[in-house]
Amino acid sequence: MGYKVAVVGATGAVGREMLKTLAERDFPADEVVALASGRSAGLEVSYGEKRVLKVQNLETYDFTGTDIGLFSPGAQISAIHAPRAAAAGCVVIDNTSHFRMEPDVPLIVPEVNLHALPLFRKRRIIANPNCSTIQMVVALKPLHDIARIRRVVVATYQSVSGAGKEAMDELYQQTKASFVHEEVPPQQFTKPIAFNCIPHIDRFLEDGSTKEEWKMAVETRKILDPDIKVIATCVRVPVFIGHAEAVHVEFESPITEAQALAAWRRAPGVVVVDRREDGGYMTQIEAAGEDATYVSRLRRDPTVEHGLAFWCVADNLRKGAALNAVQIAEALVKQGLLAKQPA
């Protein structure tokens, strides 16, 4: 018995990746509906290699009979339409930031905290974490199981696709313009992104951190352990797809490099590429289009009593968004938590 799935925000980068991922993983869907704003209604989007879906208007769509809604339309739109979908019996897996820190909405990374999944029953909404948080907690969980994590210091190097299609277009246009001595003023970012790094993602908070940095701290605690201290510096870099992170971890008890490598090699969703030689590590361009979180450059951190440092990269559109959402839907089916809705 297949399910009816609605992809909300289907014309965006993440929405298109959701459709692609559903098809690639052969999710048991009898029907897939592509939804977006009224101005996008009538456009066509690909579902797999051979199927094309006509986009329907989210504002007028009736979610009755829809089993799963994969949402990625922006926080303000999810705030309106996710509860409407849930009230109609649809289970919403929302990729926006709107519901993540609400206590009665589970924030799920399947490799890390599937035990929290049944909490969705109260509101029929499940939150997908921030892309930079997802890859970090996937890498941290196997280590936390060995030696409890006390503190994390992380610097991110985040691709422009995390800011949407217009941001990708801006990087392309600015890069092209630089070779003919032209200037394309920044519109999606506060400074030029081509050949530059911008230490500013989302808005600034009163303490000097940005909202993106705050998300990494509070989401890590909600997903992994409320006692972990996290400080992040989040940087936008001139890369189209793929986030990278330099992670420094302090543990409560001893942990060796060999123990960490062995734990990662056993862990779902983690691939170790760590050779201490030229090119013996993963970069964003190599992770693009891949499902795994890749870890490299593992070494002891001698500045704390029990410390390790490592580098991790992942495709932010896949594991950082679409794949994680589809994996949550797969877990709902596998655990028998998804009751088929009457049409």
Image (spheres, rainbow, N blue to C red):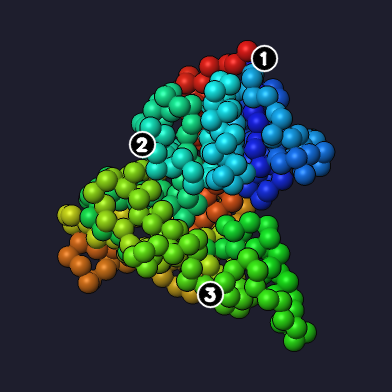
Q: Which residue is mark 2?
A: 103
Name the residue nearer the viewer: 16 or 66.
Answer: 66
Q: Is residue 323 visible?
A: no
The amino acid sitting under disc 2 is Pro
The residue at 17%/65% (across/down) is 305
Q: Secondary structure at mark 2?
A: loop
Query: Disc 1 marks which amino acid?
Result: Ala
Quadrant of the image occupied by residue 145: top left
Residue on which disc 1 sits: 343
**Which corner quadrant of the image does residue 276 belong to?**
bottom left
User: CA–CA distance between discs 2 and 3?
Assistant: 35 Å
* Mark 1 crowd level (few <14, some 14–19, many ≥20, 10 Å Cα): few
Q: Amino acid at mark 3?
A: Cys
* In this rendering, the label closer to the viewer, 1 or 2: 2
Q: Position of residue 272 (x, y in %)?
A: 44, 56
Discs 2/3, front: 2
- Residue at coordinates 64% horizontally, 20% vertically from top-left? 64
**Badge 2: residue crowd in 10 Å (few <14, some 14–19, many ≥20):** few
**Residue 43 left/right relative to 202:** right
Residue 45 vertical placement versus 91 (above, below): below
Q: Residue at x 39, y 43 (%)?
A: 101
Residue drawn at 56 percent across, 20 percent down? 89
Residue 80 position (above or below residue 28)? below
Say which residue label 3 marks.
Answer: 197
